[in-house]
Image (cartoon, rainbow, N blue to C red):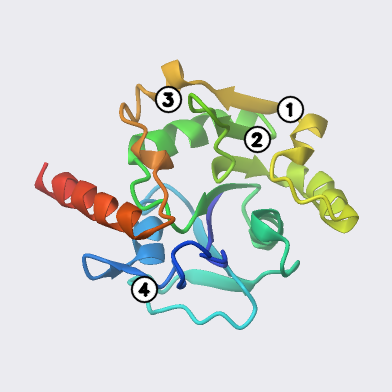
Amino acid sequence: MFAAIVLAGGKSRRLGRDKASEALLGIALWDRVISRFAGVVDEYIVVRARGQVLPAVSRHDLTIVDDLYPETGPLGGMYTGLATARSPQGFVVACDMPLLQRPLITELLRLAPEYDLVVPVSEEFTQPLCAVYSKACLEPMRRQLESGALKVTGFFQYLMPRYVLPDEWRTFDPDGLSFQNLNCEEDLERVKGLLVNEAVR
């Protein structure tokens, strides 16, 4: 069993408004992200900030939870989603990554049972907000949160990670579209264009 865990509670400082509620071609951003997992996961969990209001989405089988560690950034959301999941492993993704590619999702989930976490590595960065985590991550995550250390990758050293390198993930996502996120108006316009092209193909 696998869960999709969508982090919707980000601050959106550069965009200036709630990214999760942003509509792209008429569909809420977080709805677009959730739809990428249709048919490949067993449950859907959305983690929001306390008091955050999210727009309606097309699915009714969602579990929406408030962040257990408010104001702790993505790490708190990751912990909350994984702790909430019935599934032993969860695919964590930020709500502003609407171009997540189904073949990449499937491949990361295929690798996941053998490791504590499966994380793609792009040319410049690890991609911890497009990765699969097992329940084994919960205790080191909790310790890190309790200590106030909020670096998302800080707990990796205590576990058995599987890093998926570019020459591996490009087989499933040749252009790295899965890692495209939205931080400003220019990003929104760029991704809208990519979504239109995707729909045409």
Q: Earlier in the sequence, mark 4 or mark 1?
A: 4
- Amino acid under label 3? Trp
Task: Using residue 147 as the reference point, say whether residue 81 is left or right of it.
Answer: left
Based on the displayed image, in which of its 4 quarters is residue 100 positioned? top left
Q: Say whether marks 1 and 3 touch (CB < 8 Å).
A: no
Residue at 73%, 45% (x, y): give it: 151
- Amino acid under label 4? Val
- Residue located beneath label 1 in the image: 160
For label 3, the crowd category at 10 Å Cα-Cα, with few meaning under 14, some 14 to 19 and many 20 or more, is some
Based on the displayed image, in which of its 4 quarters is residue 192 positioned? bottom left
Q: CA distance from mark 4 to mark 2?
A: 29 Å
- Residue located beneath label 3 in the image: 169
Q: CA distance from mark 4 to mark 1?
A: 35 Å
Residue at 62%, 73% (x, y): give it: 49
Residue at 36%, 54% (x, y): give it: 38
- Residue located beneath label 2 in the image: 117
Q: Circle 1 sits in a helix, a strand or a loop, which is it?
A: loop
Q: Which of these two is toward me, 89 or 182?
A: 182
Based on the displayed image, in which of its 4 quarters is residue 34 positioned? bottom left
- Residue located beneath label 4 in the image: 57
Residue 56, above or below 163: below
Q: CA distance from mark 1 to mark 3?
A: 19 Å
Q: Which of these two is toward me, 147 or 187?
A: 187
Q: Earlier in the sequence, mark 4 or mark 2?
A: 4
Task: Using residue 133 as the reference point, say whether residue 41 is left or right of it.
Answer: left
Residue 101, above or below 157: below
- Amino acid under label 1? Met
